[in-house]
Amino acid sequence: MTDSRVPLCSVTDLQSGQARGFRVGEGPWPLSGLVLRHGEGVRAYLNRCPHAGHPLNLRPDDFLDAEGRYIVCRSHGALFEPANGHCVAGPCAGKWLPRIPVEVSRDGVFLAEGVTAEDYL
């Protein structure tokens, strides 16, 4: 039996206050996101600023502020709450990062069954 789950990262890659980027799919529009641990939970969001439509990070895995309190758009300084993706400061205040459903097991963090890149175009 083969495992059809799409792995995003290892659970051990996600210490509190850390985030990891991922890409799923081929072609010009792969699903690009970030996974982070917030408290005891794991969240994933689309890696696309609601203000300008470009990636939040400029360097690999550079998604959080120095204290790990907020997700940051490195281009415009917008701040998003890790718990829900709500923008609390910056040019897109009041907007939200789209959440990407994930499944967490001791084996890792996986894209939820049925989620595809086309869901986020």
Image (cartoon, rainbow, N blue to C red):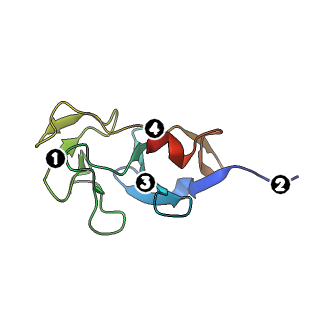
Residue 59, disc: none
| Kind of residue at badge 4 | Glu
What secondary structure is marked by label 4?
A: loop
Q: Residues within 10 Å of mark 2 (few under 14, many from 20)?
A: few
- Asked if residue 85 is positioned above or below residue 21 in the image, the reply reads above
Nearest the eye: 20 or 113: 113
The residue carrying mark 4 is 40
One can see residue 102 in this view: yes
The residue carrying mark 2 is 2
What secondary structure is marked by label 3?
A: loop
| Kind of residue at badge 1 | Ala
Cβ atoms at labels 1 and 2 below 8 Å apart: no
The residue carrying mark 1 is 78
Which mark is first along the chain, 3 or 4?
A: 3
What secondary structure is marked by label 1?
A: loop
Query: What is the distance, in whole Å, between disc 4 and disc 3 at their CAs?
Result: 10 Å
Which mark is first along the chain, 2 or 3?
A: 2
Residue name at image x 49 percent, y 57 percent: 30
Position of residue 64 measured from the top left corner of the image (x, y, whole percent)? 27, 54
| Kind of residue at badge 3 | Gln
Cβ atoms at labels 4 and 1 below 8 Å apart: no
The residue carrying mark 3 is 15
